[in-house]
Image: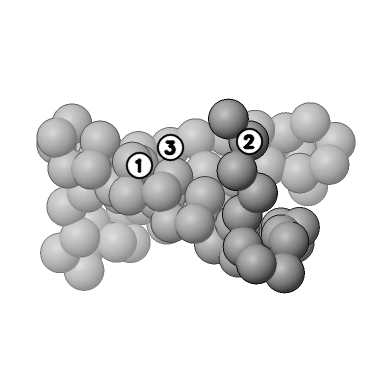
Amino acid sequence: MSDEVVLAMMDSFILELKEKGITDVVLAAGNDDGFFGVKYAGDYRGLSYLAMSSLMNIMFDSMTEIALEMKDDGRENNR
């Protein structure tokens, strides 16, 4: 699927959401071939909140997948 087709699908989806009453939308897509597309629509304050909230959620979710090595008695004190 070409990049233009994906971007057109994103535009179409944003229009569908607007018809359903969604006013602020942020969409991002990427693949292993290097495609990166971002589409957004709405008030910049709402968009900023959505983007930052998504970033934080993704960061927190990724931290649950990371295996942290700790000593038996907790974090080592590295002063």
State which quarter of the image contains the C terminus: top right
Judge whether 56 appears above or below 16 on screen: above
Mark 2 or 3, which is nearer the eye?
2
Determine the secondary structure under disc 3. strand
Please state which of residues 40 and 48 is positioned toward the viewer in this rendering: 48
Question: What colour scheme does the image use?
Answer: one colour
What's the residue type where badge 1 is placed?
Ala
Query: Residue 75: x, y in percent?
Result: 61, 54
Residue at the spot 63% in from the left edge and 35% down from the top edge: 78
Graded by Cα atoms within 10 Å as few (under 14), some (14 to 19) or many (20 or more), the crowding at tag 3 reads few
Query: Residue 18: x, y in percent?
Result: 23, 57
Mark 3 vs 1, N-terminal side: 3
Graded by Cα atoms within 10 Å as few (under 14), some (14 to 19) or many (20 or more), the crowding at tag 1 reads some
Please state which of residues 48 and 61 is positioned toward the viewer in this rendering: 61
Can residue 21 be seen in this snapshot? yes
Mark 1 vs 2, N-terminal side: 1
| Disc 2 to disc 3, C-alpha distance | 44 Å
